[in-house]
Amino acid sequence: MAFGTTDNTDEVMNEINVTPLVDVMLVLLIIFIVTIPVINHAIKVQLPQESSQPVQTPPQTLQIAVTADGQYSYQERTYDDASLQALLQAEGQKQPQPELHILGDKAVRYEKVTALMTMAKNAGLEKIGFVTSP
């Protein structure tokens, strides 16, 4: 309290300052005006159509094992070179062509494996793979 002033400043203020309230309301109004068209905006997407085509069956695999003594084995039967060539010729004519998986013994001579690969190539088989064990 200052000496010599007759103002009574200890009175309670009866008026509310509405300027901050108006500022906040205007900001909220602008935010709503900007965001409502974005919320209602839809993007038209053309989705692919479903087709009910039959699923093609995958080709079978030929798993031919080359044993340590150089014999060829397919489905628990042993084959010599001539009968194996006939089997590979018959399988090479099928559509879709089967895949040839070669299971080579660790002790087999490499010439037997390359002979099998040559027979498969001559029979028209195009997909040849090697099977290993960990």
Image (cartoon, rainbow, N blue to C red):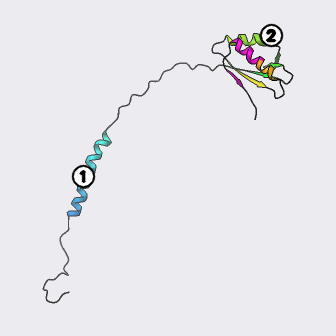
Residue 80: say if magenta.
no
Q: Which mark is residue 29?
A: 1
Please identify the quarter of the rendering in which residue 90 is found: top right
| Closer to us: 14 or 33 | 33
Is 120 left, or right, of 6 in this rendering?
Answer: right
Mark 1 and mark 2 lie on one chain; the one further toward the N terminus is 1
Residue 133: say if magenta.
yes
The outermost residue toward the right is: 69
Residue 91: percent from the left, percent from the top? 70, 13
Residue 78: percent from the left, percent from the top? 83, 17
Query: Residue at coordinates 81% horizontally, 27% vertically from top-left?
Result: 105
Question: Foreground mark, 1 or 2?
Answer: 2
> What range is drawn magenta here?
115-134
Q: How many marks?
A: 2
| Label 1 to label 2: alpha-carbon separation | 89 Å
Q: Secondary structure at mark 1?
A: helix
Q: Is residue 36 above or below residue 22?
A: above
Q: Is residue 104 above or below residue 96?
A: below
Residue underneath mark 2: 82
Q: Secondary structure at mark 2?
A: helix
| Circle 1/circle 2 CB separation < 8 Å | no
Query: Residue at coordinates 74% horizontally, 15% vertically from top-left?
Result: 118
Please identify the quarter of the rendering in which residue 94 is found: top right
Q: Is residue 3 above or below residue 98?
A: below
Residue 114: percent from the left, percent from the top? 76, 19
Q: Amino acid at mark 2?
A: Ala
Residue 95: percent from the left, percent from the top? 63, 13
- The C terminus is located in which quarter? top right
